Image (spheres, rainbow, N blue to C red):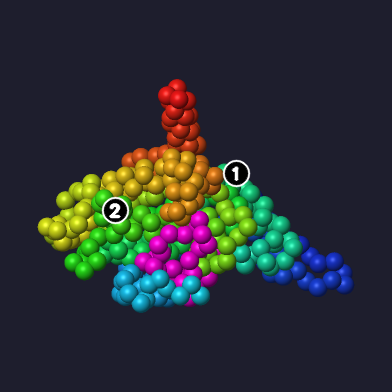
Amino acid sequence: MDAVLTSEPVAPEADAGQSPLPPFLRLSREIRDLIYLAVLEAADEAPPSPSACGPRLDLGYYEAGRIGRDWPPDPCQYRKPPLDYGTWSEWNRYSESPVRINSRSLLYLNHQVHAEMTEAISRLRASDGLYYLLDCIIENEYVLWPTWLHVPAVSSKVDIVETQIRACGDWSERWRSGWRAGCGGYAHVIWSLLELLQRFLVRGPDFLSQPKESGPKIGVLVLNIITPEEPENGFLPVESHIGSGDGRKHGLIHPESMALMLTDHTDTLLQYACGGVSELKRKKYSVMKLVDYIDRIEIRVDGNERKSWELKEVLAFYTELEERARQRSLANQ
């Protein structure tokens, strides 16, 4: 509920012999609390296109391709997470600018403002929960442009992390679609999205920072596919699977296609992240134990839920399957 001022605020006076209070602290506490809330709730606008995303880390491997002298990249230049925390990320265009944390400057101002802002963060968490918003443009079904729009405060537990996924552009004959899937597994879009997630779990919102000893935990991870403005020729037909690309039409991928394939890919990914495969196989594909970090994952289209997973329930399902297999093995001995 908004604070209502019943009288004109009176600025406190400094004690005799002391320096006058800074102008901000002369405001009433009610007004300061409203300012803290406005700062915490502020969010940036999503960039309209990749060209508006600002300076990005681009080592050129998208153009060079994965085959040849340029691959694998120089580990001193290619900022890949350590073993067990990284997947292919040469298609992710990470911002080289520092992430804007809404509360950071006020927390560093002085002891009193730090204490008041900390209280404001606690009130926000108690009322609405701590919410982060990441925008991710997938350009030409291939290159990912992640941009943080809202990070109110750094915390070891974030109630909701939402990634809004937006498609733009057309797939190319040279690179095909990053959503492809075949007998060799999935192409890189699902792995690149996993890379974003695992960098966050290891490093926090600054994707290019050094790994932390203890990264943040997530209550609900929301993958929200946003429907862009429909192109003149319409979207491509809804697809639940993209193969080699032979005979596939050109155009803008349908948001429902992304939802279907993201759901399918996540189902498979959670086998690795929640005990459905051996530890050796999980580490081979550099998938973290997401069940230790995330409570729930939701896939949405324009805010409408398509599918969700409670990760502890997924773990229990695979644990039960493993126990049944063990019992059958013992019975057959």
- Name the foreground residue: 328 vs 3: 328
Residue in the picture at 60% in, 60% down: 212
Q: Which residues are magenta?
A: 77-101
Q: Secondary structure at mark 1?
A: helix
- Whether residue 195 appears in this view of the structure is yes
State whether residue 161 is above or below residue 75: above
Residue in the picture at 57% in, 53% down: 216
Q: Which residue, given by chain and number where applicable, does mark 2 sit on?
A: 184
Q: How many marks?
A: 2
In the rendered image, which quarter contains the C terminus?
A: top left
Residue 93 inside the magenta-drawn segment: yes
- Residue 320, position as x, y percentages in the image: 46, 29
Say whether residue 279 is left or right of residue 71.
right
User: Quick one: which residue is furthest to the left in this view?
Assistant: 247
Crowding at mark 2 (Cα within 10 Å: few <14, some 14-19, many 20+): few
- Residue 331, position as x, y percentages in the image: 45, 22
Badge 2 amino acid: Gly
Numbered tag placed on residue 126 in the rendering: 1
- Name the foreground residue: 140 vs 276: 276
Q: In which quadrant of the rendered view does residue 144 lie?
A: bottom left
Q: Tags 1 and 2 in contact by the CB under 8 Å rule?
A: no
**Along the polypeptide, which appears first: circle 1 or circle 2?**
1
* Magenta residues, dominant SS class: loop
Residue in the picture at 69% in, 56% down: 116
Is label 1 or label 2 in front? 2
